[in-house]
Image (cartoon, grey):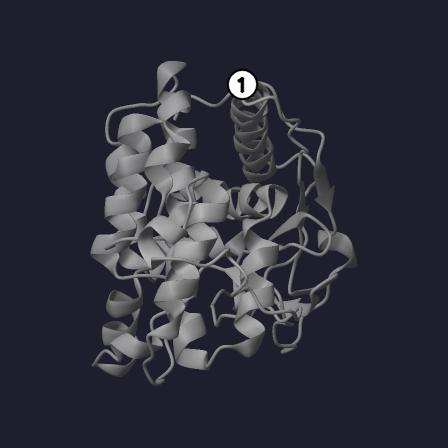
């Protein structure tokens, strides 16, 4: 990725010197890069809810699919999802270190892309903040440690990143390359887009009355949409001529390596499909590639139909 010399975002909060090590777990409401999975049951009511949610977001009448109804299936409540992730602790670093410059440049590219997309639809894009931390951090979603990996907190509209996760992405997951790292940032920004458009708040309300298994299945669709949004960003970034040969393949490999099935096989030797909450490796690659190929938000409808 030809990122050097390009605009860097001012929306970086460098809290590495204020962060400390420790084993504090992630708080509620954080949308993360997954590590491993949990066993759980199954269910079907989420399929009806998905149709209603998809109708609300993509502008079609859900009664044409449900055979009646007015979308009143959305329950109240404000519960939100949590995921398990992994990443080593990190120390402080110079304020102008190269990796920080890379992150600031990728964030600037997402700002430019999403500002343009929102403007084309008569909307105003609100830039998220990206917080760099070391060891542990407090967000509006609670405490999180570096062992929790990158995450987005809808409560404060911020992406949180301990950059040593990039080392883990390379060394432990086998997902090397700058654009693999850019994909991680773009995925979390994709959750910010969902937050701005209301998708995330609707989901968080709905899951309050759902079983863990049903919430997991809906979470998969939310996460795959964030992957697709990352692909949309990559599409427009490619049009600028700053992608290099192998960049997209690098991002697709990263999506493969952090699929629920791949991580579960690596961690426990077997998979528990009903516990998936981010999507299989194939699904993550498919939706990332779909967004990249078309560059259209309308092609990122993961909220209804087969995945």
Q: Nearer the viewer, residue 115 or 271?
A: 115
In the image, residue 121 above or below residue 99? above
Q: Position of residue 157 (x, y in %)?
A: 68, 48
The quadrant in which residue 91 appears is bottom right
Residue at figure coordinates x 31%, y 49% from the top left: 254
Q: Position of residue 217 (x, y in %)?
A: 37, 68
| 204 sits left or right of 257 in the view | right
In the image, residue 280 above or below residue 170? below
The answer to whether residue 4 is visible is yes
Q: Position of residue 108 (x, y in %)?
A: 59, 27
What secondary structure is found at the residue carrying circle 1?
A: helix
Q: Quadrant of the N terminus?
A: top left
Residue at figure coordinates x 40%, y 51% from the top left: 62
In the image, residue 10 above or below residue 198? above
Residue occupying the far front of the picture: 68
Residue at figure coordinates x 52%, y 55% from the top left: 164
The answer to whether residue 175 is visible is no
The quadrant in which residue 150 appears is bottom right
Q: Quadrant of the C terminus?
A: bottom left
Residue occupying the far right of the picture: 18
Q: For the residue carrying disc 1, how many other residues have a C-alpha within 10 Å: few (<14), some (14-19), or many (20+)?
A: few
| 265 sits left or right of 42 in the view | left
Residue at the spot of label 1? 120
Residue at figure coordinates x 29%, y 45% from the top left: 287
| 249 sits left or right of 109 in the view | left
Report the number of numbered marks. Answer: 1
Q: Nearer the viewer, residue 219 or 206?
A: 206
Q: Position of residue 104 (x, y in %)?
A: 60, 33
């Amino acid at each position: 990725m030809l990122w050097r010399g390009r605009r860097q975002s001012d929306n970086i909060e460098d809290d590495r010197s204020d962060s400390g090590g420790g084993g504090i777990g992630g708080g509620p409401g954080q949308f993360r890069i997954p590590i491993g999975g949990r066993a759980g049951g199954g269910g079907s009511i989420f399929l009806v809810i998905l149709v209603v949610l998809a109708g609300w977001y993509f502008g079609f009448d859900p009664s044409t699919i449900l055979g009646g109804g007015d979308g009143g299936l959305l329950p109240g409540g404000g519960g939100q999802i949590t995921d398990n992730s992994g990443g080593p602790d990190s120390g402080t670093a110079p304020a102008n270190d190269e990796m920080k410059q890379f992150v600031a440049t990728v964030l600037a590219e997402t700002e430019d892309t999403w500002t343009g997309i929102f403007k084309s639809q008569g909307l105003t894009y609100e830039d998220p903040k990206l917080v760099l931390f070391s060891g542990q951090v407090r967000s509006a979603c609670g405490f999180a440690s570096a062992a929790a990996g990158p995450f987005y907190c809808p409560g404060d509209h911020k992406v949180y990143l301990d950059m040593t996760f990039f080392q883990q992405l390379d060394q432990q997951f086998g997902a090397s390359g700058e654009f693999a790292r850019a994909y991680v940032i773009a995925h979390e920004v994709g959750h910010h887009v969902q937050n701005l458009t209301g998708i995330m708040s609707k989901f968080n309300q709905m899951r309050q009355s759902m079983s863990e298994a049903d919430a997991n299945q809906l979470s998969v669709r939310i996460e795959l949409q964030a992957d697709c949004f990352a692909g949309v960003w990559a599409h427009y970034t490619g049009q600028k001529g700053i992608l290099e040969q192998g960049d997209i393949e690098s991002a697709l490999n990263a999506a493969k390596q952090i699929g629920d099935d791949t991580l579960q096989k690596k961690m426990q030797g077997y998979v528990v499909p009903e516990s998936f909450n981010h999507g299989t490796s194939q699904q993550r690659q498919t939706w990332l590639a779909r967004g990249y190929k078309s560059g259209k938000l309308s092609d990122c409808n993961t909220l209804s139909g087969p995945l």
